[in-house]
Amino acid sequence: MIAVIWDKKTPINGVSAETYLQNNPHIANDDLILVMDESTNKVVRVESAQILKTIANIKEDLSPIEIFNEFERLMEEQRAQNLDKITQLEKENAEMMYALMMGGLI
């Protein structure tokens, strides 16, 4: 994954910058980050640095790329925490099922 600040002039996957911005007026004035697939150089996501900053509750004055990197770090941390929670719940579920089976309830 490659993240770059969009110049708002370069087409995105064949769509002119003008068309993209007209179809997305809610982010037209924001700093926009293009997230690209490294193997194809195709844009897979367009992110607003301002929206990411708000979602991640980032208070520091960071560059758009720094905001994107911090947002991605926080999302990965959240995914890891969620995976830990799921693993714990699956373990508890297995233990409960075993207890029910051993007790002859199922």
Image (spheres, rainbow, N blue to C red):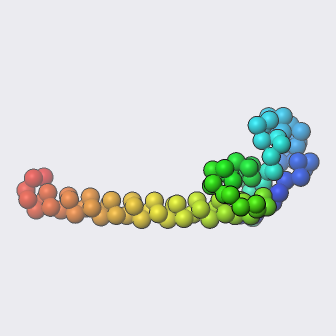
Which residue shows up at 13% across the image and 59% down it? 101
Residue situated furthest left in the rendering: 104
Left or right for 7, reference 33: right
User: On the image, which quarter does residue 17 sit in?
Assistant: top right
Question: Where is residue 40 drawn, in percent x and y?
Answer: 77, 60
Left or right for 55, reference 38: left
Which residue shows up at 92% across the image and 48% down it? 9
Question: Where is residue 50 drawn, in percent x and y?
Answer: 74, 49
Whether residue 41 is visible: no
Which residue shows up at 82% across the image and 41% down it? 28
Whether residue 38 is visible: yes
Give 48 or 10, whichever is nearer the viewer. 48
Left or right for 75, reference 101: right
Total numbered badges shown on the rendered structure: 0
Which residue shows up at 39% across the image and 61% down it? 85
**Quadrant holding the N terminus:** bottom right
Question: Where is residue 55 drawn, in percent x and y?
Answer: 63, 50
Vertical relation: 91 (above or below) 48: below
Give 61 or 24, whichever is nearer the viewer. 61
Question: Where is residue 104 drawn, in percent x and y?
Answer: 7, 56
